[in-house]
Image (cartoon, rainbow, N blue to C red):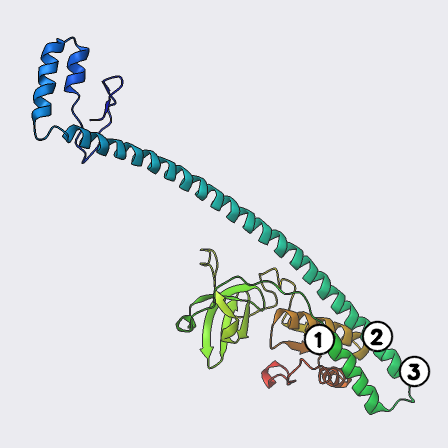
Amino acid sequence: MDFDEKTLAPTYRLIIGVAGNSNAFNICRRFGMPDMILGRAIQLKNESPLHNMEEVMERLNQQSRDLNKEKDRVDKTLHQAEELKNSLEDARDEFYRRKDSILEKAREEAENMKRDLRVQSETIIKEVKKNDYALNKNKLGDKISDIRGRIDGLAVPGRENRRDPLPQDKIRKGTYVYIDTIDSEGTIVSVSRNQVSVQCGLIQVKVTPDHLFKAKKPKKQDKILPYAHKKTMTRSVAQVHTELNIIGKTVDEAIPEVDRFLNDCFMAGISPVRIIHGKGTGSLRRGVQDYLRTLNFVTDVLGADPTNGG
């Protein structure tokens, strides 16, 4: 039991593994024992070969008290450091939230500007086609393709990905993943060579393994739907459809809609998509297909199978 040598009172503090020094003489003196008896006792003690043990114990006890004070100081410093660390992490998260919000707004504005620019360019191209018959058709087509290519190549601010890459052994059916191209999470439904099919809400997308990253655990209410449909459930592709119906429109009316539709799909990383033009005289089909073949980001144009109208 620890003892206060100044007041000769117990501190009621138990110290495990340390022997306390004796305060017998001080206590006896405090309670009035004659100095003659105390002097004789001290003399006998000093004649003992172990008389300096009291000093050794005192030094050990003092070192122990100093270490305890230092430990308390270190614990306090660690606590303050932990609070500072938590504060810095909160500030960092708030910084990233603001940064992401600003970048998202800039990205949306850039996408809208790019979409409007493409629509305006198509209008200008149509006017050139109608009014300038003197131009060589081949040169005109090359010029139009060049204009469209420049617009398609405009850079749009991307989202910063701070997630860890998905290990190769985790690229298997049933793994919940994050896709950086569409800023969305989903579950792998199949793996085929260098293509991975992922179900993201209502849409199933195909990506290469290098676009897959570790995702947070899915919420309990998340469900894997059996087929893709028109809309996704994420902010990045919330208004993107996989199908466009232009039946009944003229070629001039349909092209701007097709252009906006493909631009949205391209920005969201969705492929393939379907355009329903109907049969009729076939002019709408030919006009749309001719236009699709001028776009450098369209890799192939195919008709539907007979069960879907041909």
Which amino acid, by three-letter code, is at mark 2?
Answer: Thr
Residue hosting label 2: 123
In what quadrant of the picture does the N terminus appear?
top left
| Picture quadrant of residue 101 | bottom right
Q: Position of residue 117 (x, y in %)?
A: 79, 70
In what quadrant of the picture does the C terminus appear?
bottom right
Return the disc, 1 or 3, that comes first in the chain's sequence: 3
* Residue positioned 74% across, 64% down in the render: 112
Q: Which mark is residue 131?
A: 3
Q: Residues within 10 Å of mark 2 (few under 14, many from 20)?
A: some
Q: What's the CA distance linking mark 1 and mark 3?
A: 28 Å
| Pick the front one: 283 or 40 | 40
* Residue positioned 26% across, 31% down in the render: 62
Report if residue 155 is visible in the image.
Answer: yes
Q: What's the CA distance linking mark 2 and mark 3?
A: 12 Å
Return the disc, 1 or 2, that comes first in the chain's sequence: 2
Give the structural element (helix, strand or loop) at label 1.
loop
Camera-side mark, 1 or 2 = 1
